[in-house]
Amino acid sequence: DIVMTQTPLSSPVTLGQPASISCRSSQSLVNSDGNTYLSWLQQRPGQPPRLLIYKISNRFSGVPDRFSGSGAGTDFTLKISRVEAEDVAVYYCMQATQFPHTFGQGTKLEIK
Amino acid sequence: EVQLLESGGGLVQPGGSLRLSCAASGFTSSSYAMSWVRQAPGKGLEWVSLISGSGGSTNYADSVKGRFTISRDNSKNTLFLQMNSLRAEDTAVYYCAKYGGQVIDYWGQGTLVTVSS
């Protein structure tokens, strides 16, 4: 199975400041079709997860442009350019290149 | 608007069975793979199973293989998860999820399954 490792597991940030979360996979996520199926999800307290970013860097419908994704191969990053109060949540990376699909442990974003 | 509504959760004894359902609307369900993902209390997300749009192909996590069966009825836009031989470690919120290509793009609100005597 592909293991997804996120760092940090907890991130206290100041409102208006940037935040960054890293996700590393135990093997390359490049699929045989040439795509890399790495997504980022946001789960606010008491809510189901919500798709933010797919295929490394594509923002899903309705996602604010302060969220961005980057990376390649086995190393990926989610960045929030200016954190807002509504961004308090747990963020997960997920790979869907190989079965079983797997998630990172989650990173809790908190306001300082 | 895509909507996924799970039902069927509840309290069950160890070794018992439960069948979850997910009613889908807002899209042609036969065109998309669907999945179940679970989240134990206070824990992270765990992918459980996937079924292709036609229902002809399925995949399972090792933790549930041989005990859980995913299926779908496209005529009723409904996804199912039959769970047998339930264990305490299966206690979780079970989410129904829709794939758009190889991406989970929509999630249901979840249904809680508690396995306890």
Image (cartoon, rainbow, N blue to C red):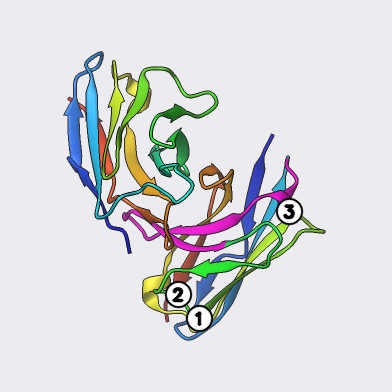
> Between marks 3 and 2, how big is the CA–CA gap?
24 Å
Residue B64: assigned label: 2
Among the two numbered marks 3 and 2 on one chain, the one whose residue lies closer to the N terminus: 3
Percent x, y for residue B51? 60, 62
Q: Is mark 1 on a helix, strand or loop?
A: loop
Query: Do labels 3 and 2 touch, CB within 8 Å?
Result: no
Dividing the picture into quarters, in which one does residue A18 lie?
top left
Give, as a single range, the part of the protein colored magenta: B27-50
Residue drawn at x 64%, y 48% as measured from the top left: B4
Q: Mark 2 lies on which chain?
A: B
Q: Residue furthest right?
A: B75
Is B41 left or right of B82, judged from the image as shown?
left
- Asked which quadrant contains residue B107, the reply is top right
Amino acid type, label 1? Arg
**Residue at 77% across, 58% down:** B74
As drawn, the residue found furthest toward the top would be A16
Q: How far apart are marks 1 and 2 (CA)?
A: 5 Å
Above/below status of A22 relative to B55: above
Figure check: A58 above or below A84 = below
Tags 1 and 2 touching, CB below 8 Å: yes
Residue A11 placement (x, y as % from top left): 19, 33
Q: Mark 1 points at which residue?
A: B67
Q: What residue type is labelled 3?
A: Ser
Mark number, residue A15: none
